[in-house]
Every structure is written in structure tokens, then in C-alpha cells.
Image (cartoon, coloured by chain):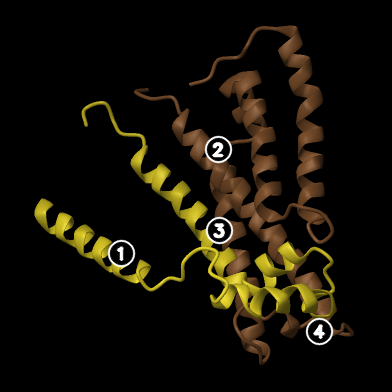
Amino acid sequence: MIKRYNSIIVDVTCRIMVPFIQLFGLYVIFHGHYSPGGGFQGGVLLATSIIVHRLCMGYKESYAKFPPQRAYMIGAIGMFLFVLTALTPVFFGGAFLDFSFLPIPRLEPAELRYYGILIAEIWIGIAVFGSLLVIFDKLTERRGG
Amino acid sequence: MKNFAKIVIAAFAAILIYATSGLPIPGDPEAPVSGHISEFYIENSMEDTNTPNVVTSVLADYRGFDTMGETLVIFTASLACMLILIKRSADD
């Protein structure tokens, strides 16, 4: 159980930080082709932004903004869509996870693999985001009530 | 039943230790990893996947199956957390 931290400094800092952490997380996911980073790191950053909000605002306000039930759903959906994306080339004549067989028209195989990596990274980021948030929420849950 | 679990874990550990003995020594120049595979990734990443960052292309494309396993591990960890720390009623 987390109580709200009664300090104007913590409050304002948290409010300013959270959107920028989220923006940086998205940047890390989408810029993984050119710089260090990718789905895992970006997903962790996205989860961190919500965890910072949980720690500063207390569970009551934070659960209203981002309910824990949504985290379960997001983690499961990300994982499911990643496996589905990995399975898609099998139905179009390729091997499992061979993104050059993704059914997107008018693209070279190399470009298809480029976009396949991007799609996979997005789903990985979403899955990691949800999973880490579930772990945090479960560890800090209100007990005995 | 407790002993059964112990036996299964011991057997699994024995299999893992036996499998480890077949791995190449870290840094072995004769190992397949230091042979042609790394060079293949570095040389062909750009034209195969259009991706300048070789690490990303190896992680998500050449070794995509490994990455799927990693994501599944994190997802399974969250599921295990959920099941272990599940809310119980007071009389439990």
C-alpha cells in the first residue's frame, strides 16, 4: 500500500517527469534501429513512468489514472500480438519469425524485415510494460482488506 | 510428494550440468561463435534487414526466437507474481 507523499516539490516534479519519461520510452522503442535500445528498454521506461506516478501520488489517485487491471490486459495483449506477428509469415510461405514474408505489399524483403523488427519491438515493449507493472502492483498491493 | 519434486529438480539439474560440459570454453577462438557467424551478422545486417544497428537486427530478426523466449520469461514472471501474491480471504 502506498500513501500519497505530501510535498509540493515531489508532486510537481512527478507531474513534470512522467510525460517526459514516457516520451523517452517511446523514443527508445522506435529508434532501436539506429541507436542502443529496443522493446525491452523502452517497455521498462514506460513501466517506470507509471511506477513513479504510483510512488508519488499514492495508490488511490494513481489507480484511478491507470488501473492495475489495465496492466494485466496490456501485458497479455502485447505478448499475444507478438506471437501472432511471429506466426503470420508461416501462413504466407515463410518460416516462424521470418519477417521477409509479412503480407505488406510493395516492399522489398529487406524493408519488410525492417518493419517486421519495428512491429516486433513495439509488441515486446507493450508486453514488458504490462508485465513489469503487474509485478510492481502485485508486490505493493493492499493486503488483508 | 515433496521428495518427488526434489528428485525432478535434481534430475533437471543433472541434465543441465551434463549439457554445460558440451559448451565451448568462453573466448575459445575455435568455437563456432567466433568463426563465421558474428562476421556474417556484421557484414549482412545492412542489406538483409536495412538496419544500421547490428545488435537490433540480431536480437529481433536473426535471433528472434531467443527474444520471444525472453519476453515470455518476463510475462511468466508477472503471471507467477500474480498467482503467488493473489489476494486471499482473511480466514485462509
Image marks 1 and 3: residues in contact by CB distance under 8 Å: no
- On the same chain, marks 3 and 2? The answer is no
Return the residue found at the far front. B29
Q: Decide: few, some or many residues near mark 2? Use Cα within 10 Å; few <14, some 14-19, many ≥20.
A: some
Where does the image place residue A11, in percent across and percent down from the top left?
73, 15
Badge 4 or badge 2: first in the primary sequence: 2
Question: The C terminus of chain A lies in which quarter of the figure?
Answer: top left
Above/below status of B37 relative to B80: below
The amino acid at mark 2 is Pro
- On the same chain, marks 1 and 2? The answer is no
Task: Decide which of A60, B51 is in the foreground and name it.
Answer: B51
Name the residue carrying label 4.
A109
Task: Decide which of A37, B34 is in the foreground and name it.
Answer: B34
Name the residue carrying label 3.
B71
**Chain represented in brown:** A
Name the residue carrying label 1.
B17
Image marks 1 and 4: residues in contact by CB distance under 8 Å: no
**Chain represented in yellow:** B
Where does the image place residue A18, in percent across and percent down from the top left?
76, 30
Horizontally, residue A82 falls left or right of residue A113, namely left
Name the residue carrying label 2.
A68
Horizontally, residue A63 falls left or right of residue B89, namely right
The answer to whether one can see residue B25 in this image is yes
Q: CA distance from mark 1 to mark 2?
A: 40 Å
- On the same chain, marks 1 and 4? The answer is no
The amino acid at mark 4 is Pro
Where does the image place residue B89, in percent across and percent down from the top left?
29, 31
Callout 2: SS: helix
Query: In the image, what residue occupies the spot 79% across and 80% down?
Result: B48
Give the image quarter of residue A12: top right
Q: CA distance from mark 4 to mark 2?
A: 40 Å
Query: In the image, what residue occupies the spot 63% across and 22% down?
Result: A61
